Image (tube, rainbow, N blue to C red):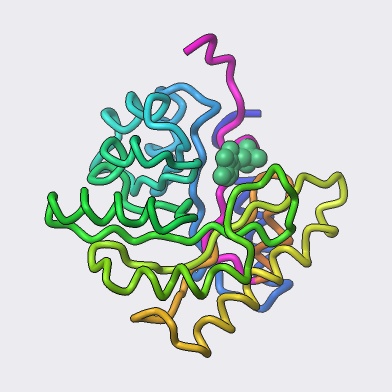
Amino acid sequence: MTLDSRLRDVETRLAAACARAGRKREDLTVIAVTKYVKTETASAAVRAGVRHIGENRWPDARDKWEALKGQAVFHYIGTLQTNKVKDVVGRFDYIHSLDRISLAEAIHKKAQALGIVVPCLIQVNVSGEESKHGLSPEQVPDLIRQLKPLAAVKPVGLMTMAPFDDEPERTRPVFRGLRELRDELNRAALAEAPLTELSMGMSNDFEVAVEEGATWVRLGTVLVGKEDLGAH
Ligand SMILES: *Cc1c(COP(=O)(O)O)cnc(C)c1O
């Protein structure tokens, strides 16, 4: 499949999922996850209209960031070690993997030094699967309270990954759970501002996530494909 046909195909599927859920397509943003493809492919995607790029390691993202900064919004979606914060803050526009106060403190410190505020999503392990990162839903209110003094870290929403399932329909409770958690947190008004974003849905399960209210889907393989990148 060519890049253009992939982009068109995903667009058709997104439109159908939005229609099924009675949602507007413009309330949903696609993040093209480029970790499996070369810089040329990421650039071609941007030329074809992609405006958001997701990556999960700075060393792998560096080339693409150098080539495309200013032309796309960059999302850091991978696990973030505290000692890598200096590489990420100031380069990525959003961090989707905030999962502990020590990480928030490191982001705050670096962001303050740069005079910026970093919008962050709190990563939640809704399914409870052991291999998945993120806080349990019960732990999220405490983290939000602890974020209050950190003015340079702005919580804007929640992120989750569903366990891979051959039957995407079975991931629905995970996505519904994240939406319900966001709505509960907003009712409790713990954050300075309502949490608006739900970052959920990947190649295998994005249509279900859209039906359950995703505002950002993170699409790698299905959107930009997968290439042999060799050792790096
Ligand atoms: C790799 C990755 C994606 C995209 O994966 P695909 O299944 O190829 O769409 C999305 N989110 C996160 C956090 C990832 O690491």
Q: Position of residue 35 (x, y in %)?
A: 51, 31
Q: Identify the image quadrant of residue 154.
A: bottom left
Is 52 a magenta residue?
A: no
What's the magenta region?
Answer: 213-232
143 over 65 or under it: above or below: below
Q: How many numbered marks are there? A: 0
Residue 5 visible (yes or no): no
Q: Residue at x 33, y 27 (%)?
A: 62
Q: Position of residue 69 (x, y in %)?
A: 26, 38
Residue 131 visible (yes or no): yes
- Which one is in front, 57 or 53? 57
Whereabouts is ligand 1, in terms of quadrant?
top right
Q: Position of residue 43 (x, y in %)?
A: 38, 31
- Which one is in front, 159 or 46? 159
Q: Extreme top residue here?
A: 231
Q: Residue at x 52, y 65 (%)?
A: 158
Determine whether, in the image, residue 211 is placed left or right of residue 167: left
119 over 146 or under it: above or below: above
**Which secondary structure type mostly characterizes the magenta part of the structure?**
loop
Is 215 a magenta residue?
A: yes
Q: Residue at x 78, y 64 (%)?
A: 172
Q: Residue at x 41, y 75 (%)?
A: 145
Determine whether, in the image, residue 40 is placed left or right of residue 228: left
Q: Where, quadrant-wise, is the N terminus in this rendering?
A: top right
Q: Position of residue 110 (x, y in %)?
A: 21, 48
227 over 209 or under it: above or below: above
